[in-house]
Amino acid sequence: MATQSSKPSLARRWEDYQPSKSALFWACAVTAVATMTIGFSWGGWVTGGTSRSLATTAGDVARGELASAIWVDRFNAAPDAAAKRVEFKALTDSYKKRQFIETGGWATMPGKTSPDLGVESCAVALAA
């Protein structure tokens, strides 16, 4: 005669399990903390403040790149652009390069009366 094991199967034990309220609470709490930890460390989640900061930085970078492209285009469209480029490349001091771009009027955005901030990016683009 075959002997039967008195130990119930895993499926049967799962069906019979009735957790207490405190066990359910702690399971939910641990799951929530684990989800947030994984989300913020590996999932790429960020807070609202970080998101605003990243968006502001990206906007400033994009604005600077666009302004540089406009300034370089205006510089290259000038009638004496070749001579001015030689004169610009002869300058070694970054302050003098900035002053050269500002006095030439290329760093002044259309509709503005004074040079914009970020002339250094224009100088870098012209030097390339």
Image (spheres, grey):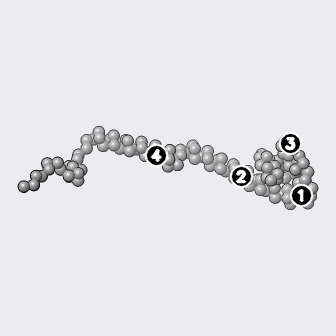
Alpha-carbon span between mark 4 and mark 1: 55 Å
Q: Label 3: which residue?
A: 93
Residue at 29% across / 39% down in the picture?
Answer: 22
Circle 4 residues within 10 Å: few <14, some 14–19, many ≥20: few
Alpha carbons under labels 2 and 1: distance apart: 24 Å
Mark 1–mark 3 Cα distance, whole angstroms, equals 20 Å
Marks 2 & 1, CB-CB < 8 Å contact: no
Sequence-wise, the earlier of marks 4 and 1 is: 4
**Depth check: 73 or 113 in front?**
73
At 85% across and 59% down in the image, what residue appears?
Answer: 76
Q: Which quadrant: the N terminus?
A: bottom left
**Residue 63 disc label:** 2
Looking at the rendered structure, the secondary structure element under dot 1 is helix
Where is mark 4, residue-wise?
A: 38
What residue does disc 1 label?
81
User: Three-letter amino acid code at disc 3?
Assistant: Asp
